[in-house]
Image (cartoon, grey):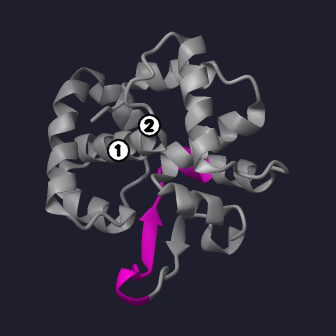
Amino acid sequence: MRVLTPEEYDLLRGAIPKLDHMIMLDTLFYTGLRYTEFQELQRHRDWFDGRVLRIPSRGRGSRTSPPRTVYLSDYARKTLPLFFKLKRKVPDRAVFDRNLKRWSATAEISPEGLSVKTLRKTWVAYLILSYPEHIDLIAQSLGISTFEELSALKSATAELRDYKDEIRRRTAGWLPE
């Protein structure tokens, strides 16, 4: 599983030529939403109350996910108003994945294992590193229900320890008061 260091994320972001795409990348990353939720978010400004995102119950039948509150870092709360002003529609997942690969080539970082899922996994790893005593709250906020997924992400934080101060800066304000 690939997790981006803050330096890699900044290089990737810096390789994006269009401001709209930069805002989309930041919104997807700093909210930790699944890509389908991210696409829906563009049509549901009402999910954002200025402090958190309130994702309603989604799906049908046995695959229904319960409603949840997604806690946001200070940076996410600043990025979301910009996201809601975008005229450009969030692209299909395959297009965004191709964009990530293209931007990684420009940034001269490895495209291996890079996808929209990488962004979510990286954000979860950052939260676990910053708030290790709140793993249950992180899982609840991001809709992670499997112990295996959390364990894998927790082990990924070991390679990020050298970036702990920078990661804490990026996750500041996430913990609800």
Residue 46 is drawn in which quadrant?
A: bottom right
Query: As drawn, is 40 to the left or to the right of 174?
Result: right
Residue extending farthest to the front is 94
Residue extending farthest to the top is 108
Tell me where residue 7 appears, x and y as whole percent: 43, 19
Q: How many neighbours does mark 1 have within 10 angstroms: few (below 14), some (14-19), or many (20 or more)?
A: many
Question: What secondary structure is marked by label 1?
Answer: helix
Decide which of 59, 82 is in the foreground and name it: 59
Query: As drawn, is 163 to the left or to the right of 77?
Result: left
Point out the frontmost of discs 2 and 1.
Answer: 1
Question: What secondary structure is marked by label 2?
Answer: helix
- At x 38% / y 80%, what residue is drawn? 63
* Residue bounds of the magenta highlight: 61-78
Distance of label 2 from label 1 (alpha carbons): 15 Å
- At x 41% / y 25%, what residue is drawn? 6
Circle on res. 43: none
Residue 106 is covered by the magenta coloring: no
- At x 63% / y 18%, what residue is drawn? 15
Amino acid type at mark 1: Lys
Tell me where residue 70 appears, x and y as whole percent: 45, 65
The residue labelled by disc 1 is 121
Q: How many marks?
A: 2
The residue labelled by disc 2 is 170
Decide which of 83, 144 is in the foreground and name it: 144
- Indicate whether 105 appears above or below 53: above
Of the 4 image quadrants, the one containing the N terminus is top left
- Indicate whether 22 appears above or below 48: above
Q: How many neighbours does mark 2 have within 10 angstroms: few (below 14), some (14-19), or many (20 or more)?
A: many
Residue 143 is drawn in which quadrant?
A: bottom left
